[in-house]
């Protein structure tokens, strides 16, 4: 080994994790965005968990396995149904089903995490319907050297915050309130559309609570308008991270674009 080779920086290994359900219309764009990431294939792994779909999501994932294996050093595809579907005619945000829906999503994220995480250094949670983000997204996130980072998810560039699960001050401030800061800002809660976490924090026990977590935590909201005190799923993860001594951060000026609808 030459001296220059010995001093060459070692790129960390990154695992992209994506839970999917009825995602067939978004998969081609998702695969295309993964292929266009500039992070080297030898340092990139991917895991997807499909649950309770009524469309061809699982079949399309299976068909794309070779494509993903060419792009990534390791690919994990998981089928795990939870037996939950929103009643016909109701939107996914219908209040009566929010606690159940978010609890199932938390369980799906945890199942995927436990099955897919191996020796990676970082986990990039990436929703399948995030349709635009910079090719050097991973490089940008790593450059901040922060353990938990949540970019600003919007539907149109410069528009209002779409992922309002990332907040501060008990849900009174969102990333759009800090636009133009030019730096990371402290958050009490995070969203999961795009979320970057040091893998060892997951290994230490940071998960997505499928139950109301943080009832007595000072960073949790005094009450949720639907289910009362305590936070679930990504918000619960943010509160749990604080309880573990980790600060969550938001990037108000690093925008990622969510699909319409």
Image (tube, helix red, strand yellow):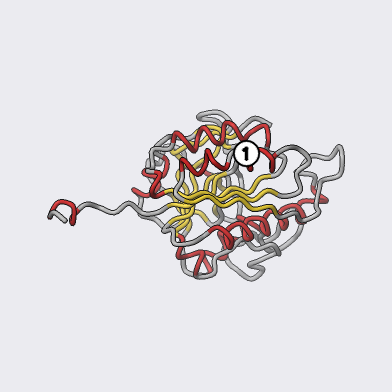
Q: Is residue 223 above or below residue 257?
A: below
Q: How many marks?
A: 1
Q: Nearer the viewer, residue 149 or 110?
A: 110
> Which one is nearer the viewer's eye here, 225 or 40?
40
Image location of residue 231, percent across then percent down:
66, 60
Residue beneath the point at 86% across and 44% down = 87
Q: Quadrant of the C terminus?
A: top right
Q: On the rendered structure, is 237 left or right of 88?
A: left
Q: Name, please, the residue furthest toward the right.
A: 88
In the image, taking residue 135 as reference, residue 240 lies left or right, namely: right
Q: Looking at the image, is 123 positioned above or below residue 58?
A: below
Structural crowding at the residue carrying mark 1, measured as other residues with C-alpha within 10 Å and reported as few (<14), some (14–19) or many (≥20): few
Q: Quadrant of the N terminus?
A: bottom left
Residue under the point 42% across and 40% down: 137
Q: Residue 102's x, y, as percent?
A: 71, 54
Report whether residue 39 is seen: yes
- The answer, for residue 191, to whether it is visible in the render is no
Rendered residue at 61%/35% (across/down) = 27
Q: Secondary structure at mark 1?
A: helix
Q: Residue 21, position in %: x, y?
A: 70, 44
Residue receiving disc 1: 63
Residue at (80% x, 44% y) in the render:
94
Where's residue 238, x and y in %?
55, 59
Depth order, front residue of 231/203: 203
């Amino acid at each position: 080994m030459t001296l220059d080779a010995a001093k060459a920086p070692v790129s960390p290994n990154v695992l992209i994790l994506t839970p999917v359900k009825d995602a067939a219309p978004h998969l081609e764009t998702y695969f295309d965005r993964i292929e266009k990431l500039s992070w080297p294939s030898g340092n990139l792994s991917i895991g997807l968990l499909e649950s309770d779909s009524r469309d061809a999501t699982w079949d399309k994932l299976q068909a794309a396995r070779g494509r993903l294996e060419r792009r990534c050093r390791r690919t994990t595809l998981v089928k795990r149904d939870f037996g939950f579907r929103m009643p016909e005619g109701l939107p996914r945000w219908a209040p009566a089903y929010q606690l159940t829906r978010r609890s199932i999503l938390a369980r799906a994220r945890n199942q995927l995490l436990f099955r897919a995480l191996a020796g990676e250094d970082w986990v990039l949670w990436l929703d399948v319907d995030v349709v635009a983000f910079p090719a050097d997204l991973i490089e940008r996130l790593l450059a901040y050297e922060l353990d938990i980072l949540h970019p600003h998810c919007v539907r149109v560039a410069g528009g209002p915050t779409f992922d309002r699960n990332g907040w501060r001050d008990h849900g009174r401030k969102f990333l759009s309130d800090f636009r133009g800061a030019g730096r990371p800002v402290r958050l009490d809660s995070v969203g999961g559309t795009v979320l970057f976490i040091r893998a060892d924090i997951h290994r230490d026990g940071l998960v997505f609570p499928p139950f109301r977590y943080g009832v007595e935590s000072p960073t949790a909201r005094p009450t949720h308008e639907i289910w009362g005190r305590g936070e679930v799923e990504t918000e619960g993860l943010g509160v749990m991270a604080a309880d573990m001594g980790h600060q969550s951060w938001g990037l108000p000026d690093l925008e990622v674009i969510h699909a319409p609808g």
